[in-house]
């Protein structure tokens, strides 16, 4: 049965007004177009719905039975469509975000709190995960957004730069390196260096070789978590490497961090989404919100 919404709305307009003239005016169409829609509907249903005289329009018995039920159903449909496109209601709902463990424990909580304060009907569910699992969470559909360090392009995942930051050395406040105004990679030559295992150190080594081939650099110890690295630094076991967004955690451990130069190596952090998939309105709002906030943070300048 090929009944259209235009036909149904035409019938409702006639039933409400009792006039083809008024019904046509309410729908902004001509009377002939209205008559055509009513005729098409009656032919599709195989029964008359309207009896028309020179002065008045009457609903048939079937038309009278159809009118209240159809009126209620189309009102429900209009309400649903209004809710879907209502800008105020688009700022509600849940957005799921996967972030690497360090980002999730430093940068994300305050951003989420600020966003939810401005969008009280929204909820951001944060999934903290190992760096290498961020894109996998996005691909599996477990989250709409993934946030982590840049990775090789993927045919199923799109990435957009969110922010970048230079590499920093972390040490106790009374460490000899604290007295160096412009700290360079070469200054770490005689220090035990603690770095994160995996691509963090691998890509850093590649970047250093490309930027300064004569510079000898290697991590003394590689660990899985920044909290482990910072605990080792606090115990006097070496100097850790990090990106500035780790500042809240570094401060929590009572440590100091200083940017490394000669050369300056920076690391990009990106937002990962499913390629070809539109974000929900609330997810897009969250993304639009956190970008400027992150880039305005003093320690990421």
Image: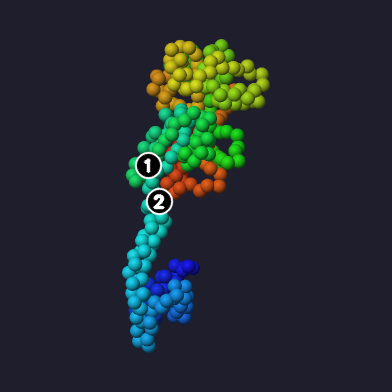
Q: Quadrant of residue 155?
A: top right
Residue at the (57%, 26%) spot, across then down: 199
Residue at the (52%, 47%) spot, across then down: 277
Q: Is residue 283 above or below residue 61?
A: above
- Mark with earlier residue (1, 2): 2
Give the alpha-carbon distance from disc 1 to disc 2, as whole Å: 13 Å
Q: Secondary structure at mark 1?
A: strand
- Decide if residue 59 is on the left or right side of residue 195: left
Q: Kindly tell me whether residue 292 is visible in this rendering.
A: no
Q: Position of residue 76 (x, y in %)?
A: 36, 61
39 or 23, which is in the foreground? Answer: 39
Q: How is the image coloured?
A: rainbow
> Residue 114 — which label?
none
> Residue 123 — which label?
1
Q: Secondary structure at mark 2?
A: helix
Outermost front residue: 46
Q: Which residue is mark 2?
A: 90
- Decide if residue 57 is on the left or right side of residue 221: left
Residue at the (41%, 73%) spot, across then down: 10
37 or 113, which is in the foreground? Answer: 37
- Decide if residue 28 is on the left or right side of residue 197: left
Q: Residues within 10 Å of mark 1 (few under 14, many from 20)?
A: some
Q: Position of residue 49 (x, y in %)?
A: 39, 77
Residue at the (52%, 35%) spot, across then down: 136
Outermost bottom residue: 54
Q: Kindly tell me whether residue 243 is visible in this rendering.
A: yes
Q: How many marks?
A: 2
- Decide if residue 199 is on the left or right side of residue 214: left
Q: Quadrant of residue 208?
A: top right
Q: Residues within 10 Å of mark 2 (few under 14, many from 20)?
A: some
Q: Is residue 127 above or below residue 71?
A: above
């Amino acid at each position: 049965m090929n009944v259209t919404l235009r036909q149904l709305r035409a019938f409702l307009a006639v039933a409400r007004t009792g006039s083809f003239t008024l019904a046509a005016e309410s729908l902004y169409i001509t009377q002939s177009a209205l008559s055509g829609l009513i005729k098409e509907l009656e032919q599709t249903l195989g029964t008359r719905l309207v009896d028309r005289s020179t002065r008045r329009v009457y609903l048939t018995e079937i038309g009278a039975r159809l009118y209240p039920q159809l009126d209620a159903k189309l009102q429900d449909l209009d309400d649903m469509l209004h809710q879907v496109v209502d800008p105020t209601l688009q700022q509600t709902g849940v957005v799921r975000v996967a972030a690497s463990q360090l980002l999730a424990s430093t940068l994300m909580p305050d951003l989420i709190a600020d966003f939810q304060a401005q969008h009280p009907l929204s909820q951001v569910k944060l999934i903290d995960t190992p760096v290498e699992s961020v894109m996998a969470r996005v691909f599996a559909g477990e989250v709409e957004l993934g946030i982590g360090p840049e990775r090789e392009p993927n045919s199923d995942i799109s990435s957009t730069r969110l922010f970048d930051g230079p590499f920093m050395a972390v040490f106790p406040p009374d460490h000899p390196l604290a007295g160096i105004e412009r700290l360079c990679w070469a200054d770490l030559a005689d220090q035990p260096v603690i770095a994160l295992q995996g691509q963090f150190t691998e890509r850093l080594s590649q970047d250093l070789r490309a930027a300064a081939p004569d510079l000898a650099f290697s991590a003394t110890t590689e660990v899985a978590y920044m909290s482990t690295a910072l605990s080792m630094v606090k115990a006097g076991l070496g100097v850790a490497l990090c990106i500035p967004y780790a500042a809240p955690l570094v401060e929590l451990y009572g440590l100091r961090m200083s940017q490394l130069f000669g050369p300056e190596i920076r690391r990009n952090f990106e937002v990962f989404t499913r390629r070809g998939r539109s974000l929900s309105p609330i997810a897009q709002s969250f993304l639009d919100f956190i970008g400027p906030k992150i880039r305005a943070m003093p320690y990421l300048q």
